Image (cartoon, rainbow, N blue to C red):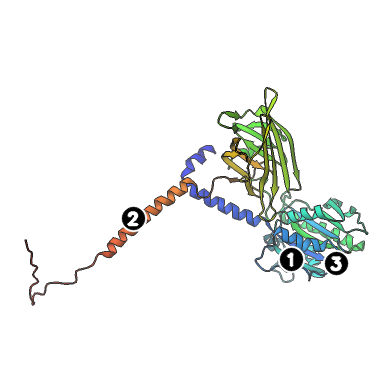
Amino acid sequence: MITLSRDCGNMEGVFRCIAILSCFCLALSTKVPVLLWSSSRSFADLPQSNGGQTVVSSDFSNQYLKPLTTGNNGNLVVFVQDKLSLQDFTQHADVYNPESDGGVFKNVKGFMDELSSLSLPSVHLPGLAIDDIIKTFEGKVHQVKDQDASKIDFDSKLPNLVIVKLTSISDSPNEEEGFRKNDETIGRVVKQLAKRGVKYSALYTATSSKAAESNKVRTRRGLLSVGADNSGTFIEYANGTLYNSSCILMYVRSINIGNSTQLNDTKSFTMTNHSCVDNQTASLAFTYKNNSEIIMTMSLIMNVNNVSGYWSIDNATVNWNETTYNVTLSKVSAPWGFSYHCSSLEKLVARNSEFTMSLEGFQLQPFDVMDYKFSDGWDCVPFFSEVIWMGLIATLAFVLILLFGFSMLASVTTQDRFDDPKGKTITVNVNE
């Protein structure tokens, strides 16, 4: 793999196109359809989604979820799975049959037809909006799996928010059968609510529009093949140090302090704290020891921007020689579902400019970790790198030379006077 990447250095333009396409695919994967229906209220007061319009996560939370969770009938049942897209409905809902009962989405179609309903074809990261509403919900929150949905204990004096986690489509041996099983679960839960006389609004969506690639072979970086062995510890890997856990992955070949100190001994790294909160906030703190004496402590706090869909390091501190420095790491940012990678992250300068450090071979993913493996890397190399600028300047110079040549050719004029054998000979007097 390393040999391939070196040999293909002259194909940087191709790789740029692949990166752009990957970003485009990522943007599509974060746009998920949402179906809503209710036995107790009308959706006339909610904004209608126009064709081609994408509802951002914050608007979905404020304009749709909050109105459904307030008032006397503020019972909201949310059915969430890992994958759902418009293509899934096209492929499995028998949409081309005018007498169709909904295919594998039989129960969902029945509820949408019989009750007050609303469909949003494209919502950006609805899972983040659901996480936000869980934190701010003023009532009783129930988070259950599909097999435990019948045991929900509704509080009649308070609004209830029920999060039903459906079976993973990615883990189902047959995708169509996975959708059918989840549809049966939705039908069973809703019918139980109707039998108990519970007034409710229901929502059916997913965290992504594409299946997780947990079983797909990835070969973009050697780090991506690291499995779950030694999870939650620092291990030596690929001439560097890897921290591998279920929610945070970090790799670094070397941490350089100033111009003289290099920290690259895997056995000297010790994790002191790491946490992940609702796929919104993650923190990581570790120390580096020299002869059992702690000489450096570093802590990182990462957050997700619900509007842009990017995660970033919002706060980074380094304690070196018993002095704490705030390090600027705001440029460490990547879209949701991507890891951040940089071959040489240099000149990380403290805000007081008295401390400099660099991270060599740095890669970080604090969210959406699948099977203890890094996702595709969002590289720190800008789109217009030095190589691209050299190519553009050389091409521009070549075009200018061609334009100059063509302009010279265009200025050449043909002879407009010729000798007439029957007329007077043209004579040109030459004075010496």
Helix, strand or loop at mark 3: loop
Which residue shows up at 79% across the image and 69% down it?
43
User: Looking at the rendering, which quadrant does residue 399 occupy?
Assistant: bottom left
Quadrant containing the C terminus is bottom left
Single out the mark in the foreground, 2 or 1: 2
What residue is rendered at 78% in x and 70% in y?
45
Q: Callout 3 environment at 10 Å: few (<14), some (14 to 19), or many (20+)?
A: some
The percent coordinates of residue 112 (x first, y second) are 79, 67
Horizontal side of 410 relative to 98 (left or right) equals left
Q: Which amino acid does the dot numbered 2 rest on?
A: Ile
3D distance between C-alphas at marks 1 and 3 = 15 Å
Q: Amino acid at mark 1?
A: Ser
Query: At 78% from the left edge and 51% from the top edge, which residue is drawn?
Result: 167
Q: Earlier in the sequence, mark 2 or mark 1?
A: 1
Instruction: Inspect this view and state whether residue 126 appears.
Output: yes
The location of residue 361, given as percent across then percent down, is 58, 37
On the image, numbered disc 1 is attached to which residue? 119
Q: Is residue 232 above or below residue 196?
A: above
Mark sitting on residue 3 = none
Q: Quadrant of the N terminus?
A: top right
Q: Which residue is mark 3?
A: 39
Q: Where is residue 231 shown, x and y percent of the image?
A: 72, 35
In the image shown, does 320 or 419 lie closer to the viewer?
320
At label 3, the amino acid type is Ser
Based on the displayed image, in which of its 4 quarters is residue 421 positioned? bottom left
432 horizontally vs 390: left or right = left
Task: Pick whichever, 301 or 141, lies toward us.
Answer: 301
Q: Residues within 10 Å of mark 1 (few under 14, many from 20)?
A: some
Tell me the CA gap for discs 2 and 1: 58 Å
Residue that numbered label 2 is attached to: 401
First in residue order: circle 2 vs circle 3:
3
Q: Real-space Cα distance between discs 2 and 3?
A: 73 Å
